[in-house]
Image (tube, coloured by chain):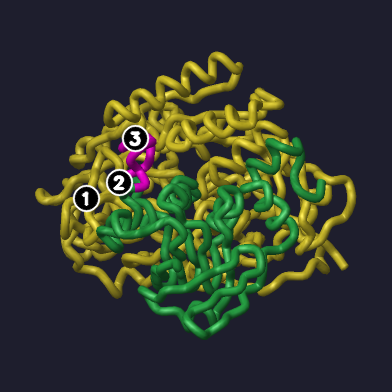
Amino acid sequence: MARVWKFGDQINTDDILPGKYAPFMVGEDRFHLYAFAHLRPGFAEEVRPGDILVFGRNAGLGSSREYAPEALKRLGIRAIIAKSYARIFFRNLVNLGIVPFESEEVVDALEDGDQVELDLETGVLTRGEERFQLRPPPPFLLEALKEGSLLDYYKKHGRFPGE
Amino acid sequence: MGLTLAEKILSHKVGRPVRAGELLVVEVDQVMVVDSIAGSFFKRLEYLEATPRYPERVSIVIDHVAPAANLEVAKAQKEIREWGKRHGIRVFDVGRGVCHQVLVEEGLVQPGFVVVGSDSHSTTYGAVGAFGTGMGATDIALAAASGRTWLRVPESVKVVFRGKLPKGVTAKDAALEMVRLLTAEGATYMAVEIHLLDGAEALTRGERMTLANLTVEAGAKAGLVVPSGEILELYRVPEWLYPDPDATYVKEVEIDLSALTPRVSVPFYVDNVHEVAEVKGKRVDQVFIGTCTNGRIEDLRAAAEVLKGRKVAPWVRLLVVPASSQVLEEAARDGTLLTLLEAGATIGTPGCGPCMGRHMGVLAPGEVCVSTSNRNFRGRMGAPDAEIYLASPRVAAASAVAGYLTTPEELEEVHG
């Protein structure tokens, strides 16, 4: 079972990881401990591997800092569900191997603290007896995600998916 | 059906006409890496067991925390210098300036180029007609290793600026107005194609950089200014580098520059743009003039014009951080610097300064800052409840003198 951590619309990368806690400011081994330090203090201690983040519209806008989603990855986040994504954040998620699902209804249906199960490949999400179908990732992403991340894909194949 | 400017550039890159929606792998002309992610960039290249495929197409700029603010940063920057030397990669060291300004000054960005940068404001390169886009450390490492990147050909939003700016109104006000009209997500995944018409083509390269810079605050992948005016004098612009008249756009927005008034973006969202008149009187603790948005010589001059013969309010810190060493030199040469100093400004090392709250002007709880930068997100410059108001250099300078948010025109009336 995974816990749902629900946030609102327009959550920016300064919210996810404030700039002053960048890895090169506080150390490579510590920066993830400051995830949501301003917005939801205590998050980094309470979150468990496999938990799911839920955002509203325009998730991850702002700075291109990949260490913001990287902090989430370090904390064991493997999937995010949002109503919509800012562009760079979306790319960073794919590159890191965090699956970015998109759905208005599912985001509206989920509550903070919900216990759910999510199949990352099929996009099937269950909450108790309820079953939601998320759109599975597109082929380009799925191909990359099969190797772990786009970085892993390129390392293994020496090219981009579909190239 | 015709092609947009973004489609033109990407079509030229792949040697066939491409349209919005297509997923492409394209050659990259320049890869820009900033200090704050350089460590991640090196680690990813190491993981790929790769080095930059075309070393001359990679630049590293030490600007986000320059000079080093603590031991961790100092170590990271030492690694950058050593790595650069080892791999024959050019490094612009402490004091050279903000990445985007430096790359443009150095001529590393040219019309028609595809440039990827590890900083979201890489849209700035659109000012010279280059497809500039921000990416994270992994994308940047892959671009350096392969010489290519993947991207989806973006749809375009057409923004037409018409007419001449009235006295006292600047490109920053125009850019904020654009973000207000588009909203923070209005151009997500899209290119913003900027047309300057009926007098607006007089905008300088610097002013165009301000416009292209802020397109990312509407979510844009790239912010392309159709080459005209000064750009045609400064660069050799390829004849294909124009959108077709029958290109299709997702939407079109018109902004009449001649009717524009000074704008301010109110915390904690960049698209929360108002007329300065609506929020004037807000007491200010710090004023910051600088960044890739507004740290150029014309910005410093605009501030100096307002500050000449005046003093900063006793409770205000006025921090001026030139966008580059070249800007600083010019300001020293033409007397701008002395005017700023006489008014009570303090000058920081060219670079990003306190823009992202790491050093050189971090805000305490409850403090208010008027900044010429590009983001006013919660906690961006320090304490989570500190407030950042984004404005033009003129409004910033006037607010520094008054000690509260105001315009130079208002200042004139009150203080003479």
Q: Which residue is label 1 attached to?
A: B363
Q: Residue at x 17, y 62 (%)?
A: B283
Q: Mark 1 belongs to which subunit? A: B
Q: Main secondary structure of the magenta part?
A: helix
Query: Taking B98 as reference, is B205 left or right?
Result: right
* Quadrant in the rendering for residue A3: bottom left
- Dividing the picture into quadrants, the one containing residue B62 is top left
Residue sitting at 61 percent across and 43 percent down? B139
Q: Which chain is green?
A: A
Q: CA distance from mark 3 to mark 1?
A: 22 Å
Magenta residue span: A20-32
Q: Residue at (49%, 47%) from the top-left corner?
A: A66
Colour of chain B in the image: yellow
Q: Which mark is residue B288?
A: none
Q: Would you name the residue on which mark 3 appears?
A: A27
The subunit letter for the residue under badge 3 reads A
The reply to whether the magenta stretch includes residue A31 is yes
